[in-house]
Each structure stands twice: as structure tokens, then as C-alpha cells.
Image (cartoon, coloured by chain):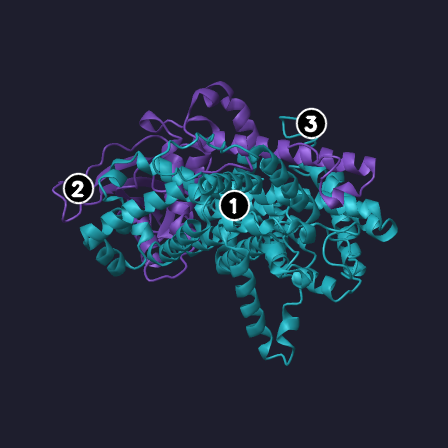
Chain colours: A purple, B cyan
Amino acid sequence: MEPPEESGGPAAIGTLSQPARTVVALALAAAAVGVAVHLLMVFLHVAPSNTATKKHGELVGSYIYPEFEQNWKLFAPNPLQQNIHVWARAEVRKDEGGSEVTGWVDLTAMDIAAIRHNVAPSHTEQNQLRRAWSFYAASHGEKDKPIGVRGELSRQYLQRIVEDRFGPRLNGGDVVRLQVRSGTTPVAAPAWSPEKTDTRTTFQVLPWWSSDVADQVDEDEGGEDAS
Amino acid sequence: MSEALNEAAHEAAQGAANGAAREPVPAPGRPAAKAPVPSPFAGALDSAAGGLSRGLARITGTTVGRYQAAVVRIGISLTWLLFLLREWPHRHELYGPDGAWSWDLADRLVAGNHAFTLLLWGRADVWFEVVYTGAILASVMLLLGWRTRTASLLFMIGVLSLQNRSVFVGDGGDNVIHLMAIYLVVTRCGRVWSLDSRRRARGRDGDGAGIALWIVLGLVLAVAQLLGRTGLTWTDGLLPWLGWTPFLWGFLLLQAVWWAVRRYAPGEPRTVLDILANILHAAGLLVIVVEVCLIYSTAGWYKVQGSRWQDGTALYYPLHLDDFSPWPGLSHAMAASGLMVLVITYGTVAVQVAFPFTLFNRRVKNVLLALMMVEHASIAVVLGLPFFSLAMIAADAVFLPTGFLRWAGDRVARLVWRGGGRDAAAGSAGEPEDARPREADDAGDPGDPGDAADAERAKDAPARAVAGPRGPGPDGEPAPSNLVV
């Protein structure tokens, strides 16, 4: 964008003094540059990985994060085609001595029950556990190995959610340890489609976590627990 | 900017049409004298330059798209206000110091990503309550347009504080509100439909509250600065002077300058400041417009690559996701028809991909806009995402035509004031520009980029649209001398 011309320029600017016109011209130039830079950065952030972002990805990232982060791949490239439920169970120390392991509780099913026939579901029901699980899954590698700080944070977060929902006392005893598993059930193919989908649920079982200290990893005891 | 483009296109089209009319009709039996075909580019450069200078005049001399900015302000602040009220019973669980995403977890994450949040300034429960309640009050302030510029800053701080405190409970709706909250700060979104504009129209001198607000903000910022609170940085790591500290102090400084100039230098300095505010506003509004286009482009172009969007079954799956079917009967009934699923699946992709390009044709753009708003309204109910949908509709509203917005605003004002025994027209008197001919308002506003019909009208508009030396708005507009920009 160029500053307005001397003659034939807009009346308002034309009547200004020379210094004032310079200020306006500079402001126009600054605004144009600012808008161009911002939009270019946002564009490169939302665009697929490409020649420019492979070379300057770090620069784009340092401009965008944390406040201009965005993700508009809503149901894209494909919508999620499976229902993921997060389950949990606890080991409780009985008041009369001894301990027992509770049955698996489908925490996601409780969220879904709260969402049913609700015109404005709360983020606590719709997002909290669902996103905590995907945060955990995305920041853990093979054999539940946490990836960086985020892996560790995501585990504590998931554990705290389960602790909040179970409470310190369960089935007449104190909760000592917790275990979480996810159950993934593919959505059946549409009735009109010739596709066949195996809709059996597969479980991923995580290790036991000691309940009292949220930031301490307990011994592994989990394994493939098919059911 | 887009107007220049219009102008050029329009001019080129007209040139071609004139050329066709002038073409000599060959007399029968005699070979026609070969007249040169007129260049379609004749005069294009001049008219482009003219369009550019008229565009500049509008950007500098007037607050372009003030109705669009106002409707985005109202929509976004209302969405966030309703969300905060809805989550009031769950606020501790979502954002409180002892919520599942505890203060310590957030502190460790923010130490890495440097997101801005007041909630990490202190871990006391009472501080949390202050910030949450403050965020509600800031939403009300912005909704009503009371001290709009300050309100927009406080609103943004409220949004960032809560969302950055617990990033893992948000969804697309929070993301839209986050971005719009930042962008709205640079716009003059309170020029119409606000308590500020009503006060301006009534010629009230409202310095008191503004000065008090400014002093309180300055004191809070100074104390926070002295205590060395998290996030008050001088740099963002990329460039010096881009951190939150220069931004917040700069904001206060600008308000002080604005107030002083309006009060003590009402001549040229005031006109220049007004022009600068208009330029900044236009830049912010342009960013909002392009941001919405990027949202739809991203959503659309990534879908094109998905096999489920290609085979026409994509819609079926969200309707069978437990988290997003509050009304399973309705969802499953919608998903039962293969043809309906196909039509909506393809229609969604087509509309999302096409939308940014339809901005070059007013009618097609308006039809698509209506379709997208209807789709979002359905998403609100069917997928149980009312706040996401409301935020998207609010952002979409930046593309609504000025004529429609003014009509709708007038209807609402009449409804609101009917019971009050007040003159209905006075109710909407918050629009100091009302005296201006409509054409000037409608001409090629950024809400309707690429509107050829508007470009035509714009030709005679600049004379009226351009501000006099005293500033924008018609003569006789009382000089606002409040703190708020």
C-alpha cells in the first residue's frame, strides 16, 4: 500500500499538514506490513507441511504459539469412526483388613449419560476425560513410556480425573491404587453400506498407579487384559 | 482494498460492454472497415488507482464495517458470558486451583509454553474467584459496549486467563473465542450498538468512570509488575518489545494520550489520532475476515482428502459418536437415510471450500452465509455443541451485509424500547452516523468484499464518506472526550 498522492488524494488526508500526512502514511504502511505478516504466519500454521514450513517451521511456531494456535481440521480428513471409553478400577484397603479390587467402571458412559438430552453439555462431561485421554495417548509411546514433560503431565492429569470421580473412599475402604484402561469400539458401518466393520471392543490396559502420591509412578502390573 | 479490486473488475467489464456497443455494424455488400478492438485494459490502471485512493479515504476517514465489528463483539462476548454462567457450578473443576488440571500441572506446562494467564499469579481460591467473576463482568462490559476499548482488553485477559489455565478442556469454540478476543482489542467495535455510542450521541461528557478505570488498571499492573508476576515479559522470545509488559503499558499510555489529545488538542492531532484508530480498526477487521476464511478453507480442504468425505458417509459417523449425540433418536434418524447423509456430507465440503471465493459475489456469498449459519445452528442441537456453534455464527456475522445489520438492529431497538414509553427511533440513536445517507454506509464495506453493485454506488459516496477536518462523522457530532478509544 502506498501513501496517498498529493493531488486527487482523499480530502481528509489532503487537508492535513505535511508531518501529519507522514504519520498517517507510516501508520498505513505499518498496518499493511503487520496484517501481511500475521496472516502469512497463520496461513503457514494451518497449511499442510510444505516447502516453506519445512524450512521456516520454527519461526512460524514461535510466532503462533501460544496465543494464536489453532486447529480447524474439524472431522477432517476423516471423522472419528470409533467410540473410545475410559474405564477405571481401584484397589481398596478394607477397614476390617485385607484389600480388594473393584470391578471396572465405565467413566465415559457416565459422561454420556450426563450429555443425554442436555441442551448445553458441560466441558466437564464433553471434553475433560475425552481430551485427557487423547492427551495421554498422544504423549505416551510404546509400553506406556511417557514422552517428555507432557507425558508425565498427562498421566498425572488422567489420574487426578479418576481420583476426583472415585473419591478417597470406595466400597467401604480406602482407595490405594488405581488402574485405567481404554475401550475402543469401531462405529458399525451404515446399514445401507456394503462395508462390514468388526465392532468388537479392544482394550488397552495401563499400569496400576499408586493413589496417594499423584506424581509417583508405581510398579507395573498391567498387562493385556482382554475381555 | 477489496474495493480497489471491485472497481477494477467493474471498470473492465464496463469498458468491454461499451466497446461492444460502439462496434460498427458492417454495411451489406461492403467489407467493413477494420476498427481496432478496444483494449479491455483501457483506463483500468486509472480506475484501479482511483479505487485505491477511495479505499484509503474510507479506511482512514471512516470506521469501516462498524456494524460488522459490533455484531462480532456482541456475539463473541455473549457466547463467552453464557459459557461462563453455564459452567459456574463446574468452575472449580475446570479452572480452579484444585481442579483435575491442578495449579501445579498448569504452572509446569505454562513454564514451557509461556501462555498468558492471571490465574497463575496466585494459587489462592479467592484469587480464582476474583478472576472468574472478573471475566464475567468483562463479558458484560463488552456486550453492552461500556468503555468498549477497555472492556475488550479486560475481556481478552479474562478469556486468555481461563483458557490458558486449562487448555485441555477446550474445544473449537474456545479456540474461536480466544482468537476473536485478541483481534477485537484493535477494532473500534463500540462505534454502534453500545452504551459508548449512546453516550456520544447524547453528548455526555463521561470522563469520570473512564479515568477511574484507567487508574485502577494502572495500579494493578504496577503492583503485578513489582511483584514480578508470571507472563509479564518484555519480549515474546522472537523480538524484543513484543511481550505482554510493553503491550499492557503501551495500551494504558495510548489511552492517556488519546484522552489528553481530545481534551487539549482538538484540532489536527485529534484528527490524526482518529485516522490512526481507523487504520488499526480496518487492519483488525481484515484479520478477522481472513481468519474466518482460513477456518472454512482449512476445514474444507482437509475434508476433501478424507475417504469418508469422498464416499459420502462422513456425516454418519459423528452422528454415532456417543460424546456428540445428546439426542440419539434424532441423530440416528438423520443418519438412517443414505441419500440425506450423502447430500449433507457433500454439501458441507462444497460450502466450506467455496465460501472464501464467493466473497467476490454478494448474492452467492449471502446464500452460503445463510446456509452456514443454519448448519451451525443444527450442529448446536444435534451434536450438543451450542457454544461452539454460537461462536462460529458470531464470527460468520462479520460477513453480514450492512443493510441487513442496520435493519435487524433497528428491529431489535424498537422491540426493546417499545415498552419504555420512549421514542422508538431514539432507542437506536446510538448511531451518530444515522444522519448520513445509507449509500455511504453500504458502499463496499469489508463485510461484503467484492460487491460489484456496492462498488458502483461507492463512486459517488466518497464525497460524503470522507471525513471533514474535524474528524469522522457528520458535523455537529459532539466531541467525545472520554478515555475510551
Chain letter for mark 1, please.
B
Using the image as rendered, state which of residue A133 and residue A21 is in the foreground: A21
Using the image as rendered, state which of residue A145 and residue B380 is in the foreground: B380
The percent position of residue A69, horizontal first and vertical second, equals 51, 36
The residues tagged by marks 3 and 1 sit, at their Cα atoms, a distance apart of 36 Å
Q: Nearer the viewer, mark 1 or mark 2?
A: 1
Provide the residue designation for mark 3: B240
Seen at 66% across and 53% down, the residue is B151
**In this view, which residue lies farthest toward the right?**
B264
The percent position of residue B347, horizontal first and vertical second, equals 31, 47
Provide the residue designation for mark 1: B449
**Is there any visible trace of residue B205 in the rendered image?**
yes
Above or below, comparing residue B117 to residue B370 in the picture? above
Q: Are the residues flagged by discs 1 and 2 from a single subunit?
A: no
Quarter of image, res A32: top right
- Horizontal placement of A112 versus B234: left or right? left
Amino acid type of the residue tagged 2 in the rendering: Arg
Residue A200's tag is 2
Q: Are the residues flagged by discs 3 and 1 from a single subunit?
A: yes
Q: How many labels does the image show?
A: 3
Chain letter for mark 2, please.
A
